[in-house]
Amino acid sequence: MGKLIHFTELNSTNTYLKENFAALADKTVVSADIQTAGRGRFNRQWISQKGGLYFSILLKPTQTDYIVNLTQLMALSICKAIEDLGAKPTIKWPNDVQLNGKKICGILSETITQQNGIACVIVGAGVNVAQRDVSYVGQPAISLREAGIFIDPDILLPSILNHFWQKYDQVLSQGFASLREEYKKRFPYLGKVISVKNGTADATGTVTDISAKGTLLLNADNGLEEILIGDLIV
Ligand code: BTN
C-alpha cells in the first residue's frame, strides 16, 4: 500500500495526480472530502458534495498489457467493500457499481503516456456514501446512506483499497481472466437486451458474455459484436 494524501477540498483527485505524478510514488492514493471540478467519463462532470468518497490511485506498473482491466478491478473491489457492509451491489459493465439498480459509484481511469511509453495509470472512483440525497446526479442514483447503510467515507476507503491490492498483481500479470468469474457473478445483464452508447457506434442486442479480455459480447442484428467501451443503456 502506498502513501495516502488527504485534502478537505480539491479540484479533482484525478487532476491532482495528473499534474503531480512525476513527483509522487507508485501506489500513492489521494482523497478529498469535496471536489470542485470532479470529472466523469466522456468529459462529464462529477458533482462531488461532502459525504461522498472521492479518491484516485497513482499506478506505475512495469507490466502494462492489462492496465485497461484495472478499472474493472476497482469496480469489483468497491462491490466487495459494499458487500462487507451487508448489501448486494451489482456491476454495470464496464465499471459502474449499482445498488438496487441505481448508480452508487463511477470510475474514471486515465493513462499518461510519454516518449518512452506509459508513465502511469490513474484510477479514480467516486462512491455515494453519506450524502442524504443524490438526485442531483441526473440519472437513477443512490448513496449507501439512502440504502440504510451508515458509514464514514474514510472508513470505507481502506476496505476498498485492501480488496484492490489483494488482486492487483494478478490482474497486471493475467488480466481480466483472473477476475472474470467474480465479475460475472455480480453482472446481472447476461441474457438481457441492452444498448451500448459510445458516441460513435451505438449497438443494441442480447448480452451473451463478458469475454476473457473484459469486453462485452453482444448478439446484435448484424451478428456477434465485441464492445470495447461504452455506456450500457438498460
Ligand atoms: C463516471 O461514472 O463518469 C466516472 C466518475 C468518476 C469520479 C471520480 S471521483 C474521484 C476521481 N476524481 C475525478 O475527478 N473523477 C474521479
Image (cartoon, helix red, strand yellow):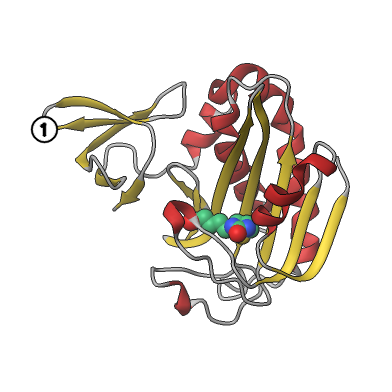
Residue at 33% across / 48% down in the picture?
232
Q: Name the residue at 64% across, 25% down.
A: 115
Q: Point out residue 20 in the picture as x, y percentages from the top left corner.
A: 77, 49
| Circle 1 crowding by C-alpha within 10 Å: few under 14, some 14–19, many from 20 | few
For the residue pair 57 and 207, the one nearer the viewer reads as: 57
Residue 13, image x, y percentages: 69, 58
Where on the picture, by quarter, is residue 12? bottom right
The picture places residue 142, in percent across and down from the top left corner, at 51, 70
Q: Residue at x 68, y 64 (%)?
A: 53
Q: Is residue 74 left or right of residue 134?
A: right
Position above or below: 224 against 140: above
Question: Ligand 1: which quarter?
Answer: bottom right
Percent coordinates x, y for residue 205 in the rendering: 20, 38
In the displayed structure image, the side of residue 194 where residue 223 appears, left or right: left
* Residue that label 1 marks: 221
**Left or right position of 104 against 211:** right
Asked whether residue 126 is in view, the answer is no
Count of picture labels: 1
Q: Which residue is at 11% across, 28% downward?
A: 222
